[in-house]
Amino acid sequence: AAVGGITETDVNLAIASKGVIIGFNARADAVARKLAESNGVDIRYHNIIYDAVDEVKAALSGMLTPDKKEEITGLVEIRQVFLVSKVGAIAGCMVLDGVVRRNSRVRLLRDNVVVWTGELDSLKRFKDDVKEVKGGFECGLSLKNNNDIQEGDQLEIFEVTEVARTL
């Protein structure tokens, strides 16, 4: 908190803010060391400024929330809708582009306007459950908690990944 050695005041500030003390070419006096030890405050000593800066950068980078990056992986056209009792609406589809994976997120487009965003409930080729269907192939799928699908609707398939942010 100040220039000079690490004092009892610095340790009390670190206790109150649940912080860490970083000393550059400075040491804690005996009272401050004992207080820090009894309260679990970490005191880190550095003689090289770059090491101190790198440690602060690493600590701050860990506090940043990750960025969410969205990548569109496929486009599907609904060609036919089947209403099945106890299941709901099943869409008979053609994968126009990319790939559809079972765990992907989905945007339902009607006349190029997003009307719903959610997840796939099931993905099938003929009667078999599959993990993915590639472009140019037909598939059957259902949407989780949504039965409002029509012939001609499109599904934009996307995945969201988290990317660590840096300073």
Image: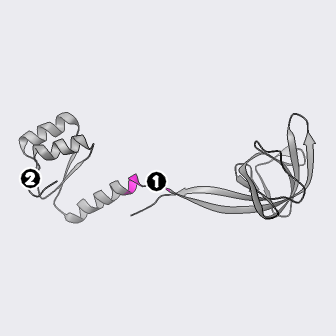
Residue 146 falls inside the magenta stretch:
no
80 lies above or below 74 = above
Type of the residue with mark 1 = Thr
Q: Is residue 20 left or right of residue 124?
A: left
- The residue closer to the viewer here, 43 or 143, is 143
Secondary element type, mark 2: loop
The percent coordinates of residue 122 (x first, y second) are 79, 44
Within 10 Å of disc 1 (Cα), the crowding (few <14, some 14-19, many 20+) is few
**Mark 2 = which residue?**
5
Q: Quadrant of residue 159?
A: bottom right
Total count of labels:
2
Residue depicted at x 76% and y 62%: 113
Type of the residue with mark 2 = Gly
58 lies above or below 17 = below
Residue depicted at x 84% and y 58%: 153
Q: Is residue 53 left or right of residue 71?
A: left
Residue depicted at x 82% and y 63%: 111
31 lies above or below 55 = above
Magenta segment: 61-66
Secondary element type, mark 1: loop
Residue 64 falls inside the magenta stretch:
yes
Q: Earlier in the sequence, mark 1 or mark 2?
A: 2
Q: How is the image coloured?
A: one colour
Q: Which mark is residue 65?
A: 1
Question: Mark 1 touching mark 2, by CB under 8 A?
Answer: no
